[in-house]
Amino acid sequence: MKILLVDDDLVDREAVRRALKAQTEEKELIEVSSAEEGLEITNKDTFDVVLVDYRLPQINGLEMIARLRRRPNLGNTAIVMMSANDDEQLALLCLQAGAQDFIPKTEITATKLRRAIAQAQKRFELECKLYDSYCRVREMAETDALTGLANRYHFERELATSITENVRQEKQLALLLLDLDHFKNINDTYGHETGDNLLKTVVKKISDCLRGEETFARLGGDEFAIILKNLEHGTEAQLVARRIIKSLEKSMMVDGQNLQSGVSIGIALHPANAENAEELTRFADIAMYRAKSQGRNRLCYFEDVMQQQFSRSFQIELELKSASHDENFELYYQPIVRGMNQKLVGFEALIRWPGSKLESYPSEFIPIAEQCGLINGIGKWVIKTAIEQLSIWQKQFDRNLSMGINLSPIQLADNQLTKYISHNLDYYDVVPESLVIELTETALFSESEQNKSQIDELDKLGCKLALDDFGTGFSSLSHLVNYPIDIVKLDRSLLPESPEHQRHLSIVRGLAEMAHTVGLKVIAEGVETSFQLLLCKDLKIEEIQGYYFEKPKSATGIQAKWLEKATTD
Protein backbone atom coordinates (compact mmCIF):
# COMPACT_ATOMS: atom_id res chain seq x y z
CA MET A 1 0.00 0.00 0.00
CA LYS A 2 1.34 3.42 -0.98
CA ILE A 3 0.54 6.21 1.50
CA LEU A 4 1.16 9.97 1.38
CA LEU A 5 1.37 11.77 4.73
CA VAL A 6 0.85 15.56 4.68
CA ASP A 7 1.64 17.13 8.07
CA ASP A 8 3.93 19.99 9.14
CA ASP A 9 4.36 18.68 12.72
CA LEU A 10 7.38 16.37 13.09
CA VAL A 11 6.10 14.84 16.33
CA ASP A 12 2.70 14.02 14.81
CA ARG A 13 4.36 12.56 11.71
CA GLU A 14 6.46 10.30 13.93
CA ALA A 15 3.31 9.09 15.73
CA VAL A 16 1.71 8.18 12.39
CA ARG A 17 4.91 6.52 11.23
CA ARG A 18 5.03 4.30 14.35
CA ALA A 19 1.35 3.38 14.03
CA LEU A 20 1.88 2.31 10.42
CA LYS A 21 5.00 0.30 11.23
CA ALA A 22 3.12 -1.64 13.88
CA GLN A 23 0.81 -2.98 11.16
CA THR A 24 1.74 -6.23 9.43
CA GLU A 25 0.82 -5.15 5.92
CA GLU A 26 3.76 -3.79 3.90
CA LYS A 27 3.48 -0.06 3.23
CA GLU A 28 5.40 2.62 1.35
CA LEU A 29 5.18 5.95 3.13
CA ILE A 30 6.06 9.34 1.61
CA GLU A 31 6.01 12.41 3.85
CA VAL A 32 5.62 16.11 3.00
CA SER A 33 5.10 19.10 5.27
CA SER A 34 2.73 21.33 3.28
CA ALA A 35 -0.37 21.14 1.12
CA GLU A 36 1.55 22.67 -1.80
CA GLU A 37 4.06 19.81 -1.70
CA GLY A 38 1.24 17.30 -1.36
CA LEU A 39 -0.60 18.67 -4.40
CA GLU A 40 2.57 18.69 -6.43
CA ILE A 41 3.54 15.11 -5.62
CA THR A 42 0.00 13.76 -6.22
CA ASN A 43 0.12 15.40 -9.61
CA LYS A 44 3.15 13.27 -10.49
CA ASP A 45 2.45 10.05 -8.59
CA THR A 46 -0.53 7.96 -7.46
CA PHE A 47 -1.33 6.84 -3.91
CA ASP A 48 -3.75 4.40 -2.30
CA VAL A 49 -4.31 6.67 0.70
CA VAL A 50 -3.57 10.30 1.53
CA LEU A 51 -3.39 11.23 5.25
CA VAL A 52 -3.90 14.99 5.61
CA ASP A 53 -3.53 17.22 8.65
CA TYR A 54 -6.35 19.76 8.95
CA ARG A 55 -4.14 22.61 10.15
CA LEU A 56 -1.42 23.24 7.57
CA PRO A 57 0.50 26.45 6.74
CA GLN A 58 -0.88 28.68 3.92
CA ILE A 59 -3.30 26.11 2.44
CA ASN A 60 -5.21 24.10 5.03
CA GLY A 61 -6.29 20.49 4.76
CA LEU A 62 -9.85 21.30 3.65
CA GLU A 63 -8.64 23.36 0.69
CA MET A 64 -6.18 20.62 -0.27
CA ILE A 65 -8.95 18.01 -0.27
CA ALA A 66 -11.15 20.28 -2.40
CA ARG A 67 -8.36 20.74 -4.94
CA LEU A 68 -7.63 17.03 -5.06
CA ARG A 69 -11.28 16.18 -5.63
CA ARG A 70 -11.45 18.59 -8.56
CA ARG A 71 -8.78 16.62 -10.38
CA PRO A 72 -10.00 14.20 -13.07
CA ASN A 73 -6.90 11.98 -12.65
CA LEU A 74 -7.02 11.38 -8.89
CA GLY A 75 -7.49 7.65 -9.45
CA ASN A 76 -8.38 5.29 -6.59
CA THR A 77 -7.07 7.50 -3.81
CA ALA A 78 -8.91 7.50 -0.49
CA ILE A 79 -8.42 10.47 1.86
CA VAL A 80 -8.26 10.43 5.67
CA MET A 81 -8.28 13.76 7.48
CA MET A 82 -6.38 14.11 10.81
CA SER A 83 -6.70 16.88 13.37
CA ALA A 84 -5.66 17.74 16.89
CA ASN A 85 -9.24 18.98 17.27
CA ASP A 86 -11.80 16.20 17.80
CA ASP A 87 -14.82 18.47 17.24
CA GLU A 88 -17.69 16.62 15.51
CA GLN A 89 -18.55 19.67 13.35
CA LEU A 90 -15.01 19.72 12.02
CA ALA A 91 -15.20 16.01 11.22
CA LEU A 92 -18.44 16.64 9.32
CA LEU A 93 -16.85 19.51 7.37
CA CYS A 94 -13.97 17.25 6.33
CA LEU A 95 -16.30 14.52 5.11
CA GLN A 96 -18.38 17.05 3.18
CA ALA A 97 -15.21 18.40 1.55
CA GLY A 98 -14.42 14.94 0.15
CA ALA A 99 -12.52 13.00 2.83
CA GLN A 100 -13.63 9.40 3.34
CA ASP A 101 -12.78 9.35 7.09
CA PHE A 102 -11.67 11.56 9.99
CA ILE A 103 -9.45 10.61 12.92
CA PRO A 104 -8.41 12.81 15.87
CA LYS A 105 -4.65 12.80 16.38
CA THR A 106 -5.16 11.93 20.04
CA GLU A 107 -6.70 8.62 18.95
CA ILE A 108 -4.00 7.58 16.47
CA THR A 109 -2.91 4.05 17.29
CA ALA A 110 -1.97 1.18 15.00
CA THR A 111 -5.44 -0.36 15.34
CA LYS A 112 -7.49 2.82 14.93
CA LEU A 113 -5.38 4.11 12.03
CA ARG A 114 -5.65 0.76 10.26
CA ARG A 115 -9.44 0.85 10.77
CA ALA A 116 -9.65 4.47 9.48
CA ILE A 117 -7.66 3.61 6.36
CA ALA A 118 -9.70 0.45 5.67
CA GLN A 119 -12.99 2.34 6.16
CA ALA A 120 -11.81 5.19 3.92
CA GLN A 121 -10.85 2.80 1.13
CA LYS A 122 -14.16 0.94 1.37
CA ARG A 123 -16.17 4.16 1.41
CA PHE A 124 -14.21 5.42 -1.60
CA GLU A 125 -14.93 2.17 -3.43
CA LEU A 126 -18.64 2.55 -2.70
CA GLU A 127 -18.54 6.19 -3.77
CA CYS A 128 -17.00 5.17 -7.10
CA LYS A 129 -19.65 2.53 -7.69
CA LEU A 130 -22.38 4.98 -6.78
CA TYR A 131 -20.91 7.62 -9.13
CA ASP A 132 -20.62 5.10 -12.00
CA SER A 133 -24.23 4.11 -11.42
CA TYR A 134 -25.23 7.78 -11.40
CA CYS A 135 -23.37 8.37 -14.69
CA ARG A 136 -25.11 5.41 -16.33
CA VAL A 137 -28.51 6.57 -15.15
CA ARG A 138 -27.77 10.13 -16.22
CA GLU A 139 -26.62 8.95 -19.64
CA MET A 140 -29.82 6.98 -20.05
CA ALA A 141 -31.84 9.97 -18.91
CA GLU A 142 -30.07 12.33 -21.33
CA THR A 143 -29.70 10.06 -24.38
CA ASP A 144 -32.19 9.28 -27.11
CA ALA A 145 -32.59 5.50 -27.13
CA LEU A 146 -33.07 5.19 -30.90
CA THR A 147 -30.30 7.37 -32.29
CA GLY A 148 -27.85 7.68 -29.39
CA LEU A 149 -28.01 11.47 -29.64
CA ALA A 150 -28.65 13.83 -26.76
CA ASN A 151 -32.37 14.03 -25.96
CA ARG A 152 -34.54 17.09 -25.35
CA TYR A 153 -33.70 17.23 -21.64
CA HIS A 154 -29.96 17.27 -22.28
CA PHE A 155 -30.35 19.71 -25.17
CA GLU A 156 -32.30 22.27 -23.09
CA ARG A 157 -29.72 22.12 -20.31
CA GLU A 158 -26.82 22.41 -22.77
CA LEU A 159 -28.42 25.33 -24.62
CA ALA A 160 -28.87 27.29 -21.39
CA THR A 161 -25.23 26.63 -20.40
CA SER A 162 -23.95 27.52 -23.86
CA ILE A 163 -25.80 30.84 -23.84
CA THR A 164 -24.29 31.72 -20.44
CA GLU A 165 -20.80 30.95 -21.78
CA ASN A 166 -21.49 32.89 -24.96
CA VAL A 167 -22.30 36.03 -22.98
CA ARG A 168 -18.82 35.89 -21.41
CA GLN A 169 -17.02 35.11 -24.67
CA GLU A 170 -18.89 37.76 -26.70
CA LYS A 171 -19.14 35.48 -29.73
CA GLN A 172 -22.07 34.33 -31.85
CA LEU A 173 -24.06 31.19 -31.05
CA ALA A 174 -26.38 29.61 -33.59
CA LEU A 175 -29.27 27.25 -32.93
CA LEU A 176 -30.32 25.09 -35.86
CA LEU A 177 -33.69 23.32 -35.68
CA LEU A 178 -34.13 20.59 -38.28
CA ASP A 179 -37.30 18.84 -39.38
CA LEU A 180 -37.34 16.05 -41.95
CA ASP A 181 -39.60 16.73 -44.91
CA HIS A 182 -42.54 14.34 -45.49
CA PHE A 183 -41.27 11.87 -42.88
CA LYS A 184 -44.84 10.99 -41.88
CA ASN A 185 -45.45 9.67 -45.40
CA ILE A 186 -42.53 7.24 -45.04
CA ASN A 187 -43.85 5.98 -41.69
CA ASP A 188 -47.34 5.53 -43.13
CA THR A 189 -46.10 3.82 -46.31
CA TYR A 190 -43.28 1.59 -45.07
CA GLY A 191 -44.00 1.25 -41.34
CA HIS A 192 -42.41 2.60 -38.18
CA GLU A 193 -39.48 0.16 -38.19
CA THR A 194 -38.32 1.42 -41.57
CA GLY A 195 -38.98 4.97 -40.40
CA ASP A 196 -36.76 4.38 -37.36
CA ASN A 197 -34.00 2.94 -39.53
CA LEU A 198 -34.27 5.94 -41.83
CA LEU A 199 -33.85 8.23 -38.83
CA LYS A 200 -30.65 6.42 -37.83
CA THR A 201 -29.32 6.71 -41.39
CA VAL A 202 -30.15 10.42 -41.50
CA VAL A 203 -28.42 10.99 -38.13
CA LYS A 204 -25.27 9.33 -39.49
CA LYS A 205 -25.31 11.56 -42.58
CA ILE A 206 -25.85 14.72 -40.53
CA SER A 207 -23.13 13.72 -38.04
CA ASP A 208 -20.68 13.41 -40.93
CA CYS A 209 -21.35 17.08 -41.72
CA LEU A 210 -20.31 18.15 -38.20
CA ARG A 211 -16.90 18.41 -36.59
CA GLY A 212 -17.85 16.74 -33.33
CA GLU A 213 -17.68 19.91 -31.21
CA GLU A 214 -21.37 20.72 -31.68
CA THR A 215 -24.31 19.59 -29.56
CA PHE A 216 -26.52 17.41 -31.78
CA ALA A 217 -29.83 16.34 -30.24
CA ARG A 218 -33.05 14.59 -31.18
CA LEU A 219 -35.93 16.55 -29.73
CA GLY A 220 -38.53 13.94 -30.66
CA GLY A 221 -40.03 12.31 -33.75
CA ASP A 222 -38.21 13.65 -36.81
CA GLU A 223 -37.13 16.93 -35.19
CA PHE A 224 -33.48 17.61 -34.36
CA ALA A 225 -31.39 20.48 -32.98
CA ILE A 226 -27.76 21.53 -33.37
CA ILE A 227 -25.94 24.13 -31.23
CA LEU A 228 -23.00 25.86 -32.92
CA LYS A 229 -20.76 27.80 -30.53
CA ASN A 230 -17.90 30.31 -30.81
CA LEU A 231 -18.88 31.68 -34.21
CA GLU A 232 -17.25 34.89 -35.43
CA HIS A 233 -20.28 35.70 -37.57
CA GLY A 234 -23.77 34.30 -37.77
CA THR A 235 -23.44 33.54 -41.48
CA GLU A 236 -21.05 30.69 -40.60
CA ALA A 237 -24.12 28.69 -39.56
CA GLN A 238 -25.32 28.55 -43.14
CA LEU A 239 -22.20 26.60 -44.17
CA VAL A 240 -23.15 23.79 -41.79
CA ALA A 241 -26.82 23.95 -42.79
CA ARG A 242 -25.98 23.80 -46.48
CA ARG A 243 -23.72 20.78 -45.97
CA ILE A 244 -26.57 19.00 -44.19
CA ILE A 245 -29.11 19.83 -46.91
CA LYS A 246 -26.69 18.68 -49.61
CA SER A 247 -25.91 15.44 -47.77
CA LEU A 248 -29.60 14.50 -47.77
CA GLU A 249 -30.26 15.33 -51.42
CA LYS A 250 -29.38 11.81 -52.53
CA SER A 251 -31.75 8.94 -51.83
CA MET A 252 -30.82 6.37 -49.16
CA MET A 253 -31.18 2.60 -49.22
CA VAL A 254 -33.06 1.60 -46.06
CA ASP A 255 -34.52 -1.90 -45.50
CA GLY A 256 -34.30 -2.57 -49.23
CA GLN A 257 -36.19 0.63 -50.07
CA ASN A 258 -34.73 3.61 -51.93
CA LEU A 259 -35.94 6.49 -49.74
CA GLN A 260 -35.63 10.24 -50.07
CA SER A 261 -35.79 12.61 -47.11
CA GLY A 262 -35.03 16.28 -47.38
CA VAL A 263 -34.71 18.60 -44.41
CA SER A 264 -35.94 22.09 -43.50
CA ILE A 265 -33.65 24.09 -41.23
CA GLY A 266 -34.42 27.16 -39.14
CA ILE A 267 -31.58 29.24 -37.69
CA ALA A 268 -31.67 31.73 -34.82
CA LEU A 269 -28.70 33.54 -33.28
CA HIS A 270 -27.60 34.59 -29.82
CA PRO A 271 -27.32 37.42 -28.96
CA ALA A 272 -28.50 38.89 -32.28
CA ASN A 273 -32.02 37.40 -32.12
CA ALA A 274 -32.59 36.41 -28.50
CA GLU A 275 -31.04 36.62 -25.05
CA ASN A 276 -32.36 33.39 -23.52
CA ALA A 277 -32.82 29.76 -24.49
CA GLU A 278 -36.61 29.85 -24.62
CA GLU A 279 -36.73 32.76 -27.06
CA LEU A 280 -33.90 31.39 -29.17
CA THR A 281 -35.69 28.04 -29.56
CA ARG A 282 -38.96 29.75 -30.43
CA PHE A 283 -37.33 31.95 -33.07
CA ALA A 284 -35.45 29.02 -34.63
CA ASP A 285 -38.76 27.15 -34.76
CA ILE A 286 -40.40 30.07 -36.56
CA ALA A 287 -37.53 30.14 -39.06
CA MET A 288 -37.84 26.38 -39.62
CA TYR A 289 -41.54 26.63 -40.45
CA ARG A 290 -40.77 29.54 -42.73
CA ALA A 291 -38.30 27.26 -44.54
CA LYS A 292 -41.01 24.60 -44.89
CA SER A 293 -43.50 27.12 -46.23
CA GLN A 294 -40.99 28.32 -48.84
CA GLY A 295 -40.78 24.90 -50.44
CA ARG A 296 -38.94 22.65 -47.96
CA ASN A 297 -35.41 21.24 -48.22
CA ARG A 298 -33.94 24.66 -47.50
CA LEU A 299 -32.70 26.84 -44.67
CA CYS A 300 -34.06 30.08 -43.29
CA TYR A 301 -32.73 32.62 -40.80
CA PHE A 302 -35.06 34.14 -38.26
CA GLU A 303 -33.63 37.63 -38.74
CA ASP A 304 -34.80 39.32 -41.93
CA VAL A 305 -31.39 40.87 -42.63
CA MET A 306 -29.65 37.51 -42.32
CA GLN A 307 -32.28 35.94 -44.51
CA GLN A 308 -31.75 38.64 -47.12
CA GLN A 309 -28.01 38.00 -47.04
CA PHE A 310 -28.56 34.30 -47.47
CA SER A 311 -31.09 34.82 -50.28
CA ARG A 312 -28.63 37.10 -52.07
CA SER A 313 -25.84 34.53 -51.66
CA PHE A 314 -28.12 31.81 -53.00
CA GLN A 315 -29.09 33.91 -56.03
CA ILE A 316 -25.43 34.73 -56.70
CA GLU A 317 -24.63 31.03 -56.53
CA LEU A 318 -27.30 30.26 -59.14
CA GLU A 319 -25.98 33.03 -61.38
CA LEU A 320 -22.40 31.84 -60.88
CA LYS A 321 -23.26 28.34 -62.06
CA SER A 322 -24.57 29.75 -65.32
CA ALA A 323 -21.74 32.27 -65.66
CA SER A 324 -19.12 29.59 -64.97
CA HIS A 325 -20.60 27.33 -67.64
CA ASP A 326 -20.70 30.17 -70.21
CA GLU A 327 -17.40 31.74 -69.04
CA ASN A 328 -19.31 34.98 -68.60
CA PHE A 329 -16.46 36.80 -66.85
CA GLU A 330 -13.85 39.35 -67.81
CA LEU A 331 -10.29 39.95 -66.70
CA TYR A 332 -9.11 43.42 -65.78
CA TYR A 333 -5.43 44.20 -65.46
CA GLN A 334 -3.60 46.55 -63.10
CA PRO A 335 -0.15 47.71 -64.21
CA ILE A 336 2.89 47.02 -62.04
CA VAL A 337 5.82 49.41 -62.47
CA ARG A 338 9.46 49.43 -61.44
CA GLY A 339 9.97 51.40 -58.25
CA MET A 340 12.98 53.48 -59.31
CA ASN A 341 11.80 54.69 -62.73
CA GLN A 342 8.09 53.70 -62.99
CA LYS A 343 8.73 51.66 -66.11
CA LEU A 344 6.05 49.05 -66.83
CA VAL A 345 7.14 45.53 -65.83
CA GLY A 346 3.90 43.55 -65.70
CA PHE A 347 0.29 43.25 -64.58
CA GLU A 348 -1.95 41.64 -62.01
CA ALA A 349 -4.99 39.88 -63.48
CA LEU A 350 -8.23 40.62 -61.59
CA ILE A 351 -11.53 38.93 -62.33
CA ARG A 352 -14.71 40.92 -62.96
CA TRP A 353 -18.27 39.79 -63.59
CA PRO A 354 -19.92 42.45 -65.76
CA GLY A 355 -22.91 40.25 -66.59
CA SER A 356 -24.01 39.84 -62.95
CA LYS A 357 -27.60 40.99 -62.52
CA LEU A 358 -26.91 41.49 -58.81
CA GLU A 359 -23.78 43.60 -59.47
CA SER A 360 -21.61 41.33 -57.38
CA TYR A 361 -17.94 42.16 -56.84
CA PRO A 362 -15.05 39.66 -56.41
CA SER A 363 -14.92 40.19 -52.64
CA GLU A 364 -18.46 38.80 -52.53
CA PHE A 365 -18.74 36.25 -55.34
CA ILE A 366 -15.31 34.58 -54.96
CA PRO A 367 -16.04 33.29 -51.40
CA ILE A 368 -19.43 32.05 -52.65
CA ALA A 369 -17.73 30.28 -55.54
CA GLU A 370 -15.36 28.66 -53.04
CA GLN A 371 -18.23 27.52 -50.82
CA CYS A 372 -20.30 25.98 -53.62
CA GLY A 373 -17.43 24.26 -55.45
CA LEU A 374 -17.26 26.48 -58.55
CA ILE A 375 -13.89 28.09 -57.85
CA ASN A 376 -11.80 25.47 -59.66
CA GLY A 377 -13.67 25.99 -62.94
CA ILE A 378 -13.56 29.78 -62.61
CA GLY A 379 -9.90 29.63 -61.56
CA LYS A 380 -8.95 27.61 -64.64
CA TRP A 381 -10.66 30.18 -66.85
CA VAL A 382 -8.63 32.94 -65.16
CA ILE A 383 -5.37 31.02 -65.61
CA LYS A 384 -5.99 30.30 -69.29
CA THR A 385 -7.22 33.82 -70.12
CA ALA A 386 -4.41 35.59 -68.28
CA ILE A 387 -1.67 33.46 -69.84
CA GLU A 388 -3.20 33.90 -73.29
CA GLN A 389 -3.31 37.69 -72.85
CA LEU A 390 0.25 37.77 -71.54
CA SER A 391 1.37 35.80 -74.58
CA ILE A 392 -0.23 38.36 -76.91
CA TRP A 393 1.37 41.32 -75.14
CA GLN A 394 4.77 39.68 -74.90
CA LYS A 395 4.85 38.93 -78.62
CA GLN A 396 3.56 42.36 -79.64
CA PHE A 397 5.31 44.60 -77.14
CA ASP A 398 7.76 43.19 -74.58
CA ARG A 399 8.87 39.61 -73.87
CA ASN A 400 9.85 40.60 -70.32
CA LEU A 401 6.33 41.48 -69.16
CA SER A 402 5.00 39.38 -66.27
CA MET A 403 1.49 38.45 -65.14
CA GLY A 404 0.26 37.95 -61.58
CA ILE A 405 -2.59 35.49 -60.98
CA ASN A 406 -4.38 35.00 -57.66
CA LEU A 407 -4.98 31.42 -56.55
CA SER A 408 -7.68 30.39 -54.10
CA PRO A 409 -6.60 28.00 -51.31
CA ILE A 410 -9.17 25.54 -52.66
CA GLN A 411 -7.44 25.46 -56.05
CA LEU A 412 -4.31 24.08 -54.39
CA ALA A 413 -6.29 20.97 -53.48
CA ASP A 414 -6.56 20.14 -57.20
CA ASN A 415 -3.65 17.81 -57.92
CA GLN A 416 -3.93 18.65 -61.64
CA LEU A 417 -3.39 22.39 -61.07
CA THR A 418 0.33 22.56 -61.91
CA LYS A 419 -0.16 20.33 -64.93
CA TYR A 420 -2.93 22.63 -66.17
CA ILE A 421 -0.77 25.75 -65.72
CA SER A 422 2.18 24.05 -67.44
CA HIS A 423 -0.01 23.02 -70.39
CA ASN A 424 -1.23 26.59 -70.94
CA LEU A 425 2.27 28.04 -70.62
CA ASP A 426 3.50 25.64 -73.30
CA TYR A 427 0.46 26.17 -75.51
CA TYR A 428 0.76 29.97 -75.47
CA ASP A 429 4.58 29.98 -75.55
CA VAL A 430 5.06 31.76 -72.21
CA VAL A 431 8.04 30.95 -69.97
CA PRO A 432 7.05 29.96 -66.39
CA GLU A 433 9.23 32.74 -64.93
CA SER A 434 6.80 35.29 -66.43
CA LEU A 435 3.93 33.97 -64.31
CA VAL A 436 3.59 35.18 -60.70
CA ILE A 437 1.33 32.98 -58.58
CA GLU A 438 -0.13 35.08 -55.77
CA LEU A 439 -1.03 33.15 -52.61
CA THR A 440 -2.74 34.42 -49.49
CA GLU A 441 -1.81 33.37 -45.97
CA THR A 442 -5.05 31.39 -45.86
CA ALA A 443 -3.62 29.12 -48.55
CA LEU A 444 -0.46 28.57 -46.52
CA PHE A 445 -1.95 28.47 -43.04
CA SER A 446 -3.55 25.02 -43.42
CA GLU A 447 -0.10 23.47 -43.92
CA SER A 448 -1.71 20.46 -45.58
CA GLU A 449 0.54 18.04 -47.43
CA GLN A 450 -1.47 18.61 -50.62
CA ASN A 451 -0.96 22.39 -50.44
CA LYS A 452 2.76 22.02 -49.75
CA SER A 453 3.16 19.54 -52.58
CA GLN A 454 1.30 21.77 -55.03
CA ILE A 455 3.34 24.85 -54.07
CA ASP A 456 6.59 22.88 -54.46
CA GLU A 457 5.45 21.72 -57.91
CA LEU A 458 4.72 25.30 -58.98
CA ASP A 459 8.16 26.32 -57.74
CA LYS A 460 9.84 23.48 -59.65
CA LEU A 461 7.91 24.47 -62.77
CA GLY A 462 9.63 27.86 -62.54
CA CYS A 463 6.71 30.11 -61.64
CA LYS A 464 7.38 32.96 -59.23
CA LEU A 465 5.51 32.64 -55.93
CA ALA A 466 4.25 35.76 -54.17
CA LEU A 467 2.82 36.07 -50.67
CA ASP A 468 -0.10 38.48 -51.00
CA ASP A 469 -1.27 40.90 -48.27
CA PHE A 470 2.07 40.51 -46.49
CA GLY A 471 2.20 41.99 -43.00
CA THR A 472 -1.46 41.55 -42.15
CA GLY A 473 -1.31 37.93 -40.90
CA PHE A 474 0.23 36.70 -37.67
CA SER A 475 2.17 33.89 -39.32
CA SER A 476 3.79 35.70 -42.27
CA LEU A 477 7.35 35.19 -41.08
CA SER A 478 7.02 31.45 -40.71
CA HIS A 479 5.67 31.22 -44.26
CA LEU A 480 8.82 32.83 -45.60
CA VAL A 481 10.76 29.97 -44.01
CA ASN A 482 8.45 27.06 -44.80
CA TYR A 483 7.55 27.87 -48.43
CA PRO A 484 9.64 28.80 -51.51
CA ILE A 485 8.34 32.39 -51.63
CA ASP A 486 10.08 34.73 -54.14
CA ILE A 487 8.04 37.90 -53.68
CA VAL A 488 6.15 39.60 -50.85
CA LYS A 489 3.38 42.07 -51.65
CA LEU A 490 3.04 44.65 -48.88
CA ASP A 491 -0.62 45.13 -48.06
CA ARG A 492 -2.12 48.52 -48.89
CA SER A 493 -3.23 48.97 -45.27
CA LEU A 494 0.43 49.24 -44.18
CA LEU A 495 1.32 52.26 -46.33
CA PRO A 496 1.13 55.50 -44.32
CA GLU A 497 -0.81 58.40 -45.80
CA SER A 498 1.58 61.08 -44.50
CA PRO A 499 4.90 61.51 -42.63
CA GLU A 500 2.95 62.01 -39.41
CA HIS A 501 2.02 58.34 -39.31
CA GLN A 502 5.27 57.31 -37.67
CA ARG A 503 4.07 53.92 -36.53
CA HIS A 504 3.03 52.94 -40.05
CA LEU A 505 6.35 54.23 -41.35
CA SER A 506 8.32 52.13 -38.89
CA ILE A 507 6.34 48.98 -39.64
CA VAL A 508 6.56 49.22 -43.43
CA ARG A 509 10.25 50.14 -43.24
CA GLY A 510 10.99 47.16 -41.00
CA LEU A 511 9.05 44.72 -43.19
CA ALA A 512 10.74 45.95 -46.37
CA GLU A 513 14.21 45.73 -44.82
CA MET A 514 13.52 42.25 -43.46
CA ALA A 515 12.29 40.99 -46.85
CA HIS A 516 15.32 42.44 -48.62
CA THR A 517 17.66 40.91 -46.04
CA VAL A 518 16.44 37.40 -46.88
CA GLY A 519 16.62 38.04 -50.64
CA LEU A 520 12.95 38.60 -51.45
CA LYS A 521 11.55 41.01 -54.01
CA VAL A 522 9.06 43.49 -52.56
CA ILE A 523 5.96 44.81 -54.33
CA ALA A 524 3.92 47.60 -52.74
CA GLU A 525 0.17 47.47 -53.34
CA GLY A 526 -2.29 50.33 -53.05
CA VAL A 527 0.07 53.24 -53.82
CA GLU A 528 -2.21 56.25 -54.28
CA THR A 529 -0.20 59.37 -53.48
CA SER A 530 3.11 60.97 -54.42
CA PHE A 531 4.20 60.67 -50.78
CA GLN A 532 3.69 56.90 -50.89
CA LEU A 533 5.58 56.70 -54.18
CA LEU A 534 8.55 58.60 -52.73
CA LEU A 535 8.46 56.37 -49.64
CA CYS A 536 8.63 53.25 -51.83
CA LYS A 537 11.62 54.72 -53.65
CA ASP A 538 13.31 55.50 -50.34
CA LEU A 539 12.73 51.93 -49.15
CA LYS A 540 14.12 50.59 -52.45
CA ILE A 541 10.90 48.68 -53.12
CA GLU A 542 11.39 46.99 -56.46
CA GLU A 543 7.86 47.18 -57.89
CA ILE A 544 4.72 49.23 -57.26
CA GLN A 545 1.05 49.10 -58.21
CA GLY A 546 -1.89 51.26 -57.24
CA TYR A 547 -4.38 53.92 -58.25
CA TYR A 548 -1.57 56.51 -58.43
CA PHE A 549 -0.64 54.89 -61.72
CA GLU A 550 -3.82 53.15 -62.84
CA LYS A 551 -6.98 51.45 -61.69
CA PRO A 552 -7.59 47.95 -63.08
CA LYS A 553 -8.70 48.26 -66.71
CA SER A 554 -9.86 45.96 -69.49
CA ALA A 555 -7.26 44.46 -71.82
CA THR A 556 -8.27 46.96 -74.52
CA GLY A 557 -7.88 49.92 -72.18
CA ILE A 558 -4.53 48.73 -70.85
CA GLN A 559 -3.17 48.07 -74.33
CA ALA A 560 -4.20 51.50 -75.62
CA LYS A 561 -2.81 53.48 -72.68
CA TRP A 562 0.17 51.46 -71.50
CA LEU A 563 1.46 49.43 -74.42
CA GLU A 564 0.61 51.07 -77.73
CA LYS A 565 1.17 54.58 -76.33
CA ALA A 566 4.53 53.51 -74.85
CA THR A 567 5.55 52.11 -78.25
CA THR A 568 4.52 55.33 -79.97
CA ASP A 569 6.40 57.43 -77.42
Image (cartoon, grey):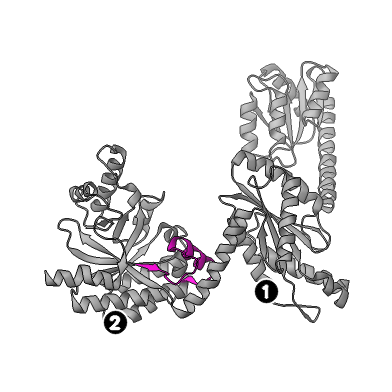
Q: Is residue 91 visible?
A: yes
Residue 52 is left or right of residue 130, and the answer is: left
Residue drawn 66% across and 68% down?
A: 245
Stretch of the chain drawn in magenta: 350-375
Front-lying residue, 61 or 214: 214
Amino acid at dot 1: Glu
* Residue 428: mark in rendering: 2
Quadrant hosting residue 565: bottom left
In this rendering, the answer to whether 176 lies above or below 49 is: below
How far across and down, in percent of the image, does residue 29 sit? 69, 32
Under tag 2, what secondary structure?
Answer: loop
Q: Which residue is mark 1?
A: 249
Q: Residue furthest left?
A: 569
Q: What type is the residue that disc 2 sits on?
A: Tyr
User: Residue at 21% of width from left, 51% of height from top?
Assistant: 533
Residue 242 vs residue 507, the one in the foreground: 242
